[in-house]
């Protein structure tokens, strides 16, 4: 796929465009990418909201036919990247770790020592699919456990 940013950088490398002249072009390309990403996120959000309404209607119909009571519909995931990733570790009911990463760094959760690989896989899948809320919630009877939440 053709990338205009590569073209601008190539022109600078070849000396056909000065870095000073390239800076506003690069800024404009970055703004366009951000606007495109936001538009895609908003469209995804609208599709998710439509699916939630459709699924809620199907659950009500099933319940009226004698099935299970409907589950309350989940609110649609807000568009855009998550605001934060929170890792909460409890030992005997006492919080011993309360790590909060900005959402933009959530992909780096795999670099946090002590987080098992299967938890990292769950986090990455939740980030890819846009899930918000608890991703991992493990607890023992004594109040020890781990909760990983994306908001």
Image: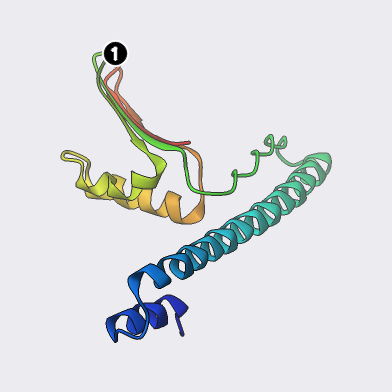
Pointer 1 local density, CA inside 10 Å: few below 14, some 14–19, many at least 20: some
Which one is in front, 78 or 55? 78
Q: Give the total number of marks visible in the rendering.
A: 1
Which one is in front, 9 or 17? 17
In the visual, does 112 lie left or right of 9? left
Residue 110 placement (x, y as % from top left): 24, 48
Seen at 32% across and 52% down, the residue is 121
In the visual, does 40 lie left or right of 99? right
Which one is in front, 129 or 103? 103
Seen at 39% across and 46% down, the residue is 104
Residue 54 placement (x, y as % from top left): 76, 51
Residue 135 in sight: no
54 is higher (above) or lower (below) than 67: below
Seen at 45% across and 80% down, the residue is 3
Residue 97 in sight: yes
26 is higher (above) or lower (below) than 16: above
Residue 57 placement (x, y as % from top left): 79, 46
Seen at 37% across and 52% down, the residue is 124
Q: Quadrant of residue 98?
A: top left
Secondary structure, mark 1, is loop
Q: Which color scheme did the rendering employ for the protein?
A: rainbow
Label 1, on which residue? 93
């Amino acid at each position: 796929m053709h990338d205009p940013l590569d073209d601008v950088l190539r022109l600078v490398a070849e000396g056909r465009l000065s870095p000073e002249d390239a800076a506003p072009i690069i800024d404009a390309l970055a703004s366009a990418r951000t606007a495109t990403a936001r538009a895609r996120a908003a469209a995804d959000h609208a599709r998710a909201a439509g699916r939630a309404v459709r699924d809620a209607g199907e659950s009500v119909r099933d319940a009226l036919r004698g099935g299970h009571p409907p589950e309350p519909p989940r609110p649609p995931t807000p568009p855009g990247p998550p605001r934060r990733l929170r890792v909460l570790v409890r030992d005997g009911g006492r919080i011993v770790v309360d790590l909060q990463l900005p959402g933009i760094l959530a992909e780096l959760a795999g670099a946090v020592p002590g987080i098992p690989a299967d938890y990292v896989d769950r986090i990455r899948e939740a980030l890819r699919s846009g899930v918000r809320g608890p991703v991992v919630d493990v607890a023992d009877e004594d109040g020890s456990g781990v909760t990983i939440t994306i908001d």
